[in-house]
Image (cartoon, rainbow, N blue to C red):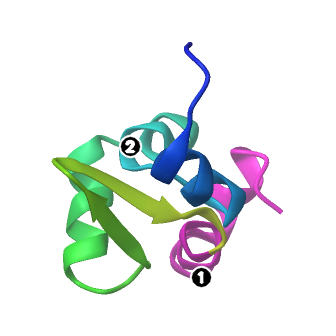
Amino acid sequence: MSKETGAKAQLRAKGFVPAVEAAEKLGFTPQSVYDWMDAEKIHGVRLGAARWVEWKSVVAYFKASSPEAAKLAGIT
């Protein structure tokens, strides 16, 4: 992976991850993460065509909607 600079590095520093990465970590499709973002269930931003989500909002939503799955995924 190349080193991120500029806006991408700033987003990472603020706790954001690419939506695709969040989906991989949780075992969901990227479309699920996009849907949560569009429904304002999680906080996210667009950077060009890419979507970035605030990881802590993803964790909070996932824990609230499926506590057992969160525990199995190691998100506690």
- Neighbour class for label 2 at 10 Å: few (<14), some, many (≥20)? few
What type of secondary structure mainly makes up the magenta span? helix
Query: Horizontal and vertical percent for residue 7?
Result: 47, 53
Q: Is residue 60 magenta?
A: yes
User: Could you say which is closer to the camera, residue 27 or residue 39?
Assistant: 39
| Secondary structure of the residue carrying numbered label 1 | helix
Residue beneath the point at 63% across and 78% down:
60
Q: Position of residue 62 (x, y in %)?
A: 55, 69
Cα–Cα span, label 2 and label 1: 16 Å
Q: Secondary structure at mark 2?
A: loop
Range of magenta residues:
57-76
> Disc 1 designates what residue?
64
Q: Is residue 70 a member of the stretch shown in magenta?
A: yes
Tell me where residue 40 appears, x and y as whole percent.
30, 86
Residue drawn at x 30%, y 72% as measured from the top left = 36
Q: Quadrant of the C terminus?
A: bottom right
The residue shown at (43%, 78%) is 42
Residue 55 horizontal/vertical position (percent) = 61, 63
Report the number of discs.
2
Residue identified by numbered label 2: 28
Q: Amino acid at mark 1?
A: Ala
Question: Nearer the N terminus, badge 2 or badge 1?
Answer: 2
Given residues 12 and 63, the one toward you in this image is 12
* Quadrant, the N terminus: top right
Within-10-Å neighbours for mark 1: few <14, some 14–19, many 20+: few
**Closest to the observer, 69 or 23:** 23
